[in-house]
């Protein structure tokens, strides 16, 4: 249910952005098209690294789910009780998740060409400056 709420919120934001009609929205759409062009100019490795950096928490949670499932499948072949198997799977998944966190911490330190595209990383909204310049040019 939580995932549905997140997707609904993102869809609502995207809908709002697509239906704005004022000058600020036009400036925002131009900035988005510039960001899309910059994204397309990146190499595949830079795109993968940038995507991973931008979705680091999703990647770590996905690695936890995968490690929980994989360790559970591995533990099934062991002659243990259900409770012991559950604890062993959790311990293995916890260790693999810690390794994933350490790997992600190292990965986000690698510089890439897409770093400036990552949302919220030093990208302040200066659309007011562009709007001011356009207003001054009209005068």
Image (cartoon, grey):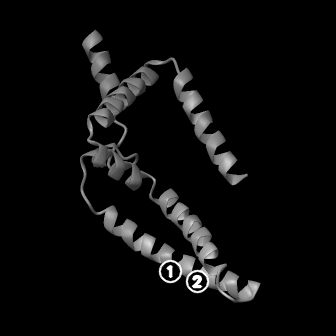
* Residue 56 seen in render: yes
26 over 47 or under it: above or below: above
Say what secondary structure mark 1 lies in: helix
Mark 2 lies on residue:
91
Q: Residue at x 35, y 43 (%)?
A: 124
Q: Residue at x 63, y 47 (%)?
A: 6
The numbered disc on residue 32 is: none
- 2 horizontally vs 11: left or right: right
Frontmost residue, 43 versus 101: 43
Which of the 4 quarters of the picture holds residue 16? Answer: top right
Q: Residue at x 58, y 40 (%)?
A: 10
Count of numbered marks: 2
129 over 66 or under it: above or below: above
Q: Where, quadrant-wise, is the C terminus in this rendering?
A: top left
CA distance for labels 2 and 1:
6 Å
Q: Position of residue 109 (x, y in %)?
A: 28, 63
Q: Position of residue 9 (x, y in %)?
A: 63, 41
Say what secondary structure mark 2 lies in: helix
Categorize mark 2 by other alpha carbons within 10 Å: few (<14), some (14-19), many (20+). some
34 over 105 or under it: above or below: above
Categorize mark 1 by other alpha carbons within 10 Å: few (<14), some (14-19), many (20+). some
Frontmost residue, 14 versus 4: 4
Looking at this view, name the residue that lies furthest to the right: 82
Frontmost residue, 9 versus 67: 67
Mark 1 lies on residue:
95
Which of the 4 quarters of the picture holds residue 31? Answer: top left
Q: Residue at x 75, y 88 (%)?
A: 81
Whether pointer 2 and pointer 1 mark residues with C-beta atoms closer than 8 Å, the reply is: yes
* Residue 139 seen in render: no
11 over 63 or under it: above or below: above
Q: Position of residue 59 (x, y in %)?
A: 48, 59
């Amino acid at each position: 249910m939580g995932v549905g709420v997140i997707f609904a919120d993102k869809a609502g934001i995207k809908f709002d952005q697509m239906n704005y009609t004022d000058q600020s929205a036009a400036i925002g759409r131009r900035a988005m098209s510039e960001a899309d062009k910059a994204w397309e100019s990146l190499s595949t490795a830079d795109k993968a690294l940038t995507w991973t950096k931008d979705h680091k928490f999703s990647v770590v949670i996905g690695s936890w789910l995968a490690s929980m499932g994989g360790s559970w499948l591995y533990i099934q072949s062991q002659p243990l009780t259900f409770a012991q198997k559950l604890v062993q799977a959790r311990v293995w998944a916890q260790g693999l998740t810690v390794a994933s966190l350490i790997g992600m911490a190292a990965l986000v330190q690698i510089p890439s060409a897409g770093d400036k595209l990552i949302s919220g990383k030093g990208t302040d909204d200066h659309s007011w400056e562009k709007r001011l310049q356009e207003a001054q040019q009209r005068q």
